[in-house]
Image (cartoon, grey):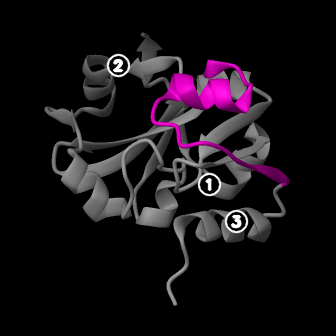
């Protein structure tokens, strides 16, 4: 039987001895709604965005109060093109709906590029493969579990 993405996230975190808490809640579809149901600051949300830069897909992870700085990212990474993956591409790559994707590109064979400003939060929060399941964990444990490439990829909304 295939494991759910939530089970895969749990396994990854346990494998790295990461402490985490699971919150089950009503379905949420936006970063703002997720922060409200969790009772946490918007900036502590680890927003996972699947994008295509030139000819390869990547995952950007950033504080939920930032948006992707597409032009700056293209310039800094030397890409000519950068776009968000469409709904069908996200489903094909992750098996998930947008908004439920956990910030672990490694689970999907994708490079993970994390905005270092997420680290301004001691604790981060994210949906774990389901619009009704959130995980809360330390940013430091996230870095140990995922080892993302760090940079500045976001800008203010």
Seen at 70% across and 35% down, the residue is 124
Give me the disc on residue 69: 2
| Element at label 1 | helix
Sequence-first disc among 2 and 3 = 3
Alpha carbons under labels 1 and 3: distance apart:
13 Å
Dividing the picture into quadrants, the one containing residue 120 is: top right
- Residue 47 lies, in percent from the top left, at 51, 35
Q: Residue at x 59, y 32 (%)?
A: 34
User: Which percent across, then down, holds residue 76?
Assistant: 33, 25
The residue to which callout 1 is attached is 146
Depth check, mark 1 against mark 3: the one in front is 3
Residue 112 badge? none
Front in this rendered view, residue 37 or 139? 37
Mark 2 is surrounded, within 10 Å at the Cα level, by few (under 14), some (14 to 19) or many (20 or more) other residues, namely some
Q: Which residue is mark 3?
A: 10
User: Which residue of the protein is positioned furthest toward the bottom in this rendering?
Assistant: 1
In terms of image quadrants, where is residue 116? top right
Mark toward the start of the polypeptide (2 vs 1): 2
Indicate yes or no whether the magenta region holds residue 27: yes
Q: Secondary structure at mark 2?
A: loop
Circle 3: element type: helix
- Mark 1 / mark 3, whichever is N-terminal: 3
Q: Is residue 71 in the magenta section?
A: no
State the separation of the CA atoms marked 2 and 3. 31 Å
Q: What span is colored magenta in the figure? A: 19-42
Q: Is residue 94 left or right of residue 86?
A: right
Residue 63 visible from this viewpoint: no
């Amino acid at each position: 039987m295939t494991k759910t993405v939530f089970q895969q996230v749990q396994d990854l975190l346990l494998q790295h001895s990461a402490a985490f808490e699971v919150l089950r809640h009503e379905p949420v579809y936006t970063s703002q709604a997720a922060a409200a149901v969790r009772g946490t600051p918007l900036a502590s949300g680890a927003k996972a965005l699947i994008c295509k830069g030139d000819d390869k897909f990547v995952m950007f992870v950033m504080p939920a109060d930032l948006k992707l700085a597409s032009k700056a990212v293209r310039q800094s990474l030397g890409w000519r093109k950068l776009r968000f993956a469409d709904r069908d591409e996200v489903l094909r790559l992750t098996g998930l709906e947008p908004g439920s994707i956990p910030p672990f590109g490694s689970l999907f064979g994708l490079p993970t590029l994390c905005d270092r400003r997420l680290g301004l939060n001691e604790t981060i929060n994210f949906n774990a493969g389901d619009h009704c399941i959130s995980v809360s964990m330390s940013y430091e444990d996230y870095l140990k579990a995922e080892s993302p490439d760090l940079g500045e990829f976001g800008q203010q909304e």
